[in-house]
Image (cartoon, rainbow, N blue to C red):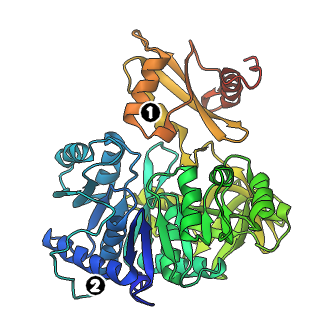
Amino acid sequence: MAFDLLESGDAALVALHHGERTLTRGELALASRRAATFLTGLDVKRGDTVAVWLPDGAVWMQLFFAAAQLGVLMIPVSTRFRLQEALHVVKTSKARVLVVPQNFLDFDYFGAASEIKAACDLLRHVVEVPQFDLPEWSTCEPYPQWEGRDTDLLCTFMTSGTTGQPKLAAHTAGGIARHARNVARVNDMRAGDVVLCALPLYGVLGFVQAIAALASGAACVLLPVFKAEAAAAAIERRGVTHFFGSDAMFDMVLNAGDYSLSTWRCGAFPEYAGLGQRVIAQAWADWGVRLRALYGMSECFAMTAMRDAEGEAEQRGMPGGTPISTDIAFRIVDPANSEQLPDRQQGELQLRGYNVMAGYLNNPVATTATFTQDGWFRTGDLAYADGSAFCYVGRIRDSLRLRGYLVDPGEVEVFLAQHPGVLAAQVVGVHVEGEGDVAVAFVRGSATPASEGELLAYCKQGIAGFKVPRRIVTVDEFPQRDGPNGVKILKNVLRDMASQCLGLVQASSV
């Protein structure tokens, strides 16, 4: 069970390092039982939903394990989100409680949460946490009962769908616990090891590595805000043995300055910025670390598949990998007719196993659409099989990977179109070497058009920073062509125009 990941093992081992603060496994387990009592005092019961809009810290972990004990579903909300985005998550999840920080990054979370509560009939309580890096509710008695089951929905992760509205991929307590143990095993995590958790817990890769660390008896070093020098300093100070992040993060940490990374022995990354082979070579040359690529997504967990750590550098950098458990299966099918394809032939990657989500929370239509009739999850990724491994090629649809986050362009387009100065919007991505996808928006102005500066300010105030386009360009018309199913926007031409706007290449003619 999920709570066993914490209560098993030596209670005196360190569970969390957060700045100067340290929390043992026993202290975190006790704090989690106190949080369970606090939640029951708010009339939270088995099967209810609690939204957690908090930075990484002791309280986040405390609430997660409290939810596991009570059989409650926890909904992590990105601290990058602003009012409208958080409102969508809380409303979709039908949360009864929303927990927010008193202070973090100069944003009024409690004020925004109060507006959310007024807009959500089912939301009964907004709880403000004064210090998210210290356990809360110390006056509560530890909750004495275990009510969670392996089949309970325990945690969700945000994903961007084809409609442009984010969905909540829900995972069970049993699936989370099983995957945590498998990830710990395949990455040789041991009691006393130290894992640098530089990615946020509300994201699936940040979550998986932290829970795997606790499953193995390792300690988590939490960094609520990633800064390369702080990460490198934490590796040196805490003796970090494991560090997982994007290729761009590794590049920054490896070049952060005069810090010793000599204790680092295991790392893996999803490649977003085209720096995979570079960081693999540098990590090996400088510190003898054999970095490797990993594969995952919100619907099937991070580290669903990984490359062989003992393979050659070129092989270790290939996106994709071998499933980390024999209980995870994959197949490659022709998207047109669903026929399974032979090795080396590209098609849609489909997955089946304990790691696959139970479904999109409160969205049965989307859940049905994403599973085949024989129970396989459609990833929407283009890939090919290579024996027992697969190689990821790209997204079948046009989703963008912006600063490590998968974003549906339609979500940004819908937001821009709500501005009175915008008649319609189209968003495309351009790959920039060393940075990954960069978003550029094209808008058709209304009768009262807005300037690029006004629209950028509007985006920065209303959506997460990683979704804000680099440029917002006003055009008279979008490039388009009449087709058998109606008018089609020519995204390829928009991408060429975007490259020109960024000073990369000359635009194609329409």
Q: Is residue 359 above or below residue 15?
A: above
The residue nearer to you, when weighing 499 against 281, is 281
Name the disc covering residue 299, or none. Answer: none
The residue under the point 61% across, 70% down is 242
* Res 469 quadrant in image: top right
Q: Position of residue 262 (x, y in %)?
A: 68, 68
Q: Give me the C-alpha separation between circle 1 and circle 2.
A: 42 Å
Q: Amino acid at mark 1?
A: Val
Of labels 1 and 2, earlier in sequence is 2
The residue under the point 43% across, 72% down is 16
Would you name the residue on which mark 2 appears?
Answer: 147
Along the horizontal axis of the image, is 112 left or right of 312? left
Q: Position of residue 399 (x, y in %)?
A: 59, 44
Total marks drawn?
Answer: 2
Name the disc covering residue 414, or none. Answer: 1
Along the horizontal axis of the image, is 333 left or right of 466? right
Where is the C terminus found, in terms of image quarters?
A: top right
Q: Position of residue 147 (x, y in %)?
A: 28, 84
Q: Is residue 417 visible?
A: no
* Res 60 quadrant in image: bottom left
Q: Amino acid at mark 2?
A: Glu
